[in-house]
Image: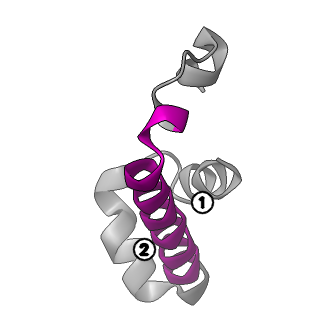
Amino acid sequence: MTLFAQLKEWSDDQPQGLAELAATDASVEGLCFELGLAAHLLQVNERRKRALFSAPVAPNFLAA
């Protein structure tokens, strides 16, 4: 969530320009890579232990 918040801030919450920004800024490119890796690891763990990811969650967590 921290990486995603930082990426939103760096891109001024404008995802349509993110590819161009990452192509011209190594810091943004690195952040995108880290965020993609984190998302991949979440997907892998979700598939392995589905019950942990289907438990009830607080609404404020889902909103964030």
Q: Secondary structure at mark 1?
A: helix
Cα separation between marks 2 and 1: 9 Å
Q: Nearer the viewer, residue 51 or 37?
A: 51
Q: How many numbered circles does the render carry?
A: 2
Which residue is pictured at 42% across the width and 62% down the height? Answer: 44
* Vertical arrangement, residue 31 with respect to residue 11, above or below: below
* Vertical arrangement, residue 56 with respect to residue 34, above or below: above
Q: Is residue 24 left or right of residue 19?
A: right
Which residue is pictured at 43% across the width and 65% down the height? Answer: 40
Residue 1 colored in magenta in the image: no
- Crowdedness of circle 1 by 10 Å Cα count: few (<14), some, many (20+)? some
Colour approach in the figure = one colour
Amino acid identity at mark 1: Trp
Task: Check disc 1 and report the residue beneath it.
Answer: 10
Badge number at residue 1: none
Task: Check disc 2 and report the residue beneath it.
Answer: 21
Q: Earlier in the sequence, mark 2 or mark 1?
A: 1
Q: Nearer the viewer, residue 46 or 17?
A: 46
**Quarter of the image holding residue 18?**
bottom left
Q: Nearer the viewer, residue 26 or 56?
A: 56
Q: Secondary structure at mark 2?
A: helix
Q: Give residue 61's position: percent from left, percent from top.
A: 63, 22
Q: Give residue 1's position: percent from left, percent from top.
A: 64, 47
Which residue is pictured at 53% across the width and 49% down the height? Answer: 12
Q: Report the span colored magenta.
A: 28-52
**Quarter of the image holding residue 6?**
bottom right
Quadrant of the rendering where the C terminus is positioned = top right
Q: Main secondary structure of the magenta part?
A: helix
Tag 2 near tag 1, CB within 8 Å: yes
Q: Nearer the viewer, residue 13 or 47?
A: 47
Which residue is pictured at 42% across the width and 74% down the height? Answer: 21
Residue 47 colored in magenta in the image: yes
